[in-house]
Image (cartoon, rainbow, N blue to C red):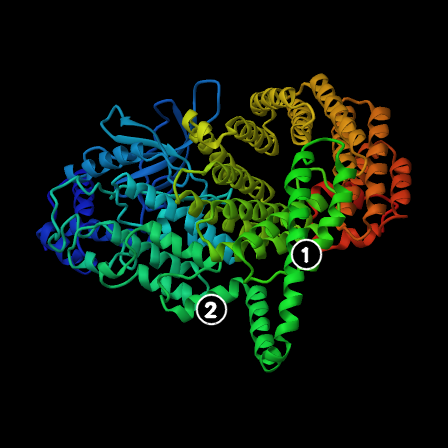
Amino acid sequence: MKQSRMSTGSIERRALELLSQALDIPSNQREDWVRTECAGDAALERRVLGLLATERSHPGALKTGGARHDTVEPEAPEQVGAYRIIETIGQGGMGAVYKGERASGNFDHTVAIKIIRPGVLSEALIERFERERQILAALNHPNIARLYDGGEMADGSPYMIMEYVDGEPLLVWADRTQAPLRVRLDLFQSLCNAVQFAHQNLIIHRDITPSNVLVSKEGIVKLIDFGISKSPDASPPVRFNPPGSRDAMSYTPGYAAPERSRGAAANTLSDIYSLGKLLADLLKPDERSPELAAIINCATAKEPADRYASVDALNDDISALRSGKPVNAFSGSRVYRFRKFVGRHQITVLSIAAVIIGLSAALATTVVQYNRAEAALSVANKRFTQARELSRTLVFDVYDQTEKISGSMEARKALAGVVKDYIDSLQIDADAPEDVLLEVGIITSRLADLYGGIGIANLGENEVSMKLFLDAQRILTDALEQNPDDKTAIAELLMVERMLTMQNLYHKNDLETAHAANDRARLLAERGLSLGREGEAPILRHFWSIRTDELQLLTTEKRTDEALEKVRLWQSELTPEMVERIGSGREMQAYFAMQEAMLLIGAERGEEALKPLETAISLRAEQLAEKPENYYFKTQLMVAHGEMATASRLAGDMARSRASAEQAVAFAREIMAEDPEDAGGPEGLSAMLQKVVTAEFRSGNLPEAKTAADEAAILMEQLVQKFPEDQFYQVRLLNVLSQAAEVDGTDPARTWSCELVKRAGNHCDIAALLEDENAGWEEESIRPLRELPCIG
């Protein structure tokens, strides 16, 4: 072994050059390759082998948006472009990744900055770095780390400024949070969407591993490090690369498809293999159902031809599994598909089985009773036809004409009793004609709306409403089994699934079931839209509304950043052509503006929320001017003014906050006065009075705040009295009481708020409610009530 003739700086530079090349050599051949290249230079050989050892212990030192620390610490520049370096995220032998913040301009922005040292990398690796910049610039997706800028430093160092992902690798996140299977599958499907998006843009990632999939603090999955990514047409279309070549070895062992180690070129099927391996590691051992195992096995099949043909096909199978439908990778047998049908429609199948058993038992007496039965059947058919015609007239003519008119609740309540008696007497079976099933399903859905539908005037009987929605779901599903392409049945079932989403979210506080209903609705809407554009408008409107329902779920789960990304993406998709196709594009524009504002308010970004709120209020006012009796438009305008009160307060404009709150209360009083039977009237007025409480309290007007709080509490007490078994109204009452306790904070004895609590205690058990883990409390909002001296 000879002594090196190079200077220390030259050794370091040459070592880093060799390191960059060694990383493209199979791991079991690297050390021999290094010794050959060092040609007996002991100092150079020790340095390169030391760097390789560090790389083994800290793999992936140059990851987009995040890296791990190595032993080499290059001196950090003070500034790159318009960004000031504030800390080192990580470094490796070839360069470093820094956290930076904007050093100029009138807004804050945190980024990740990747810099490669000048002169230490081969031309091929510098070309790879440049390619990553080009790839990221072409990929704009909420689950892919974004590129903002790039260039060269004064010393020639290439750099890239990209989205800073404040998070941790997917598997580390999963182990730490012990997230339920539903949430992990949500993230995995978001990752699949990102990979499919890249494939659609002719980009193959080629290194999908746990360290390249980060989960942000907001729970958003981000695919990073496209440094070895490639467009299928970026080089000549070869099918095989020599083992040890750069293309053959650009992957992480354990997650790479078997053919890659044999030198095969990367393609979309190799990315699918990596996704399958990642899914396998994301699951706990007891979660590997036979169907999930089949999905993993299909994705990770040894032969590429045996894998899923696309990432979408993999994603579709996961969606099918989650919605109880057959998984293509599991089995195509009729027995399996029938079992899945039974799992989704147990009540229907049991009903059919009962009918079959009953028919078998009655076979012996059929002949004897034939003549009598034939006469009875004639009478029964005549009466059924009459009842059906009456119900059709009542529901499709009378009910639909009055549903959106304020003040019509009393008339619809009387109508409901007649129709519900008819529905109850039918005891309809799954083998009824499809047109009968469809009409009865629609009637049942309308009744469910009347008893407790979300967002419309209703009787407040939420349990009755939930049962009717479940009945409607069963009946309409039966109708679709007979005629899967019936767009009317699809649209009606979509409405039912959406209502089940909201009922489970708001009245049951059951996010798991709400997400399941939302998933079913989304898949059904996509199937309906695949049937062609003729008659698509109702389904398309539901498709967009399903997106708004998802935003409410994400908001409840405090996944604000993810929801904001989605709402802004979807707003960009509301093109003039799409608005025309929907047929009610203005409604969607108003709703998404409102959703954006509420998300910003939830993040306490009131100033930003003002503009979308102004848009929503303007659109809602136009709608109401055209149809002044429309209940929905009135309630939406009321809510918009209420949120404007909150946003204005957060923005520091208390005069506007108070004025907006009073305007919201004025609309609420008008709605309640028009329909005394509508349970949504007093509940809505109570909620708007709470806006007044906050605005007045923060403005220092305690008497006005207390007056509004007292009225809000009385309204909720009345609803609790009227519906003593419905916990929803009890929870709302306690939220009002907690706000009153906060207003009363200047009095150590809290005399006034304790009086309110004492009065409310005549209608519900407050102490028991506070201890109920299923009540869905947000601890911060209920804390003032817990701290009252009269509680406990």
Q: Position of residue 631 (x, y in %)?
A: 69, 31
Tell me which amino acid carries mark 2: Arg
Q: Secondary structure at mark 1?
A: helix
Name the side, left or right, on which 490 lies relative to 39.
right
Which is closer to the viewer, label 2 or label 1?
Answer: 1
Count of numbered badges drawn on the protein: 2
In the picture, the quarter occupied by the N terminus is bottom left
Which residue is at 26% across, 33% downward? 134
Residue position for label 1: 383
* Between discs 2 and 1, the one toward the N terminus: 2
Residue position for label 2: 339
Which residue is at 72% across, 46% downward? 451
Q: Position of residue 542 (x, y in %)?
A: 52, 40
> Looking at the picture, does residue 209 appear above or below residue 330?
above
Name the side, left or right, on which 59 lies relative to 261.
right
- Tell me the crowding category of disc 1: few under 14, some 14 to 19, or many 20 or more residues within 10 angstroms, Cα based: few
Which residue is at 59% across, 65% downward? 347
Q: CA distance from mark 2 to mark 1?
A: 37 Å
Q: Nearer the viewer, residue 52 or 137?
A: 137
Q: Position of residue 351 (x, y in %)?
A: 59, 68
- Label placed on residue 28: none
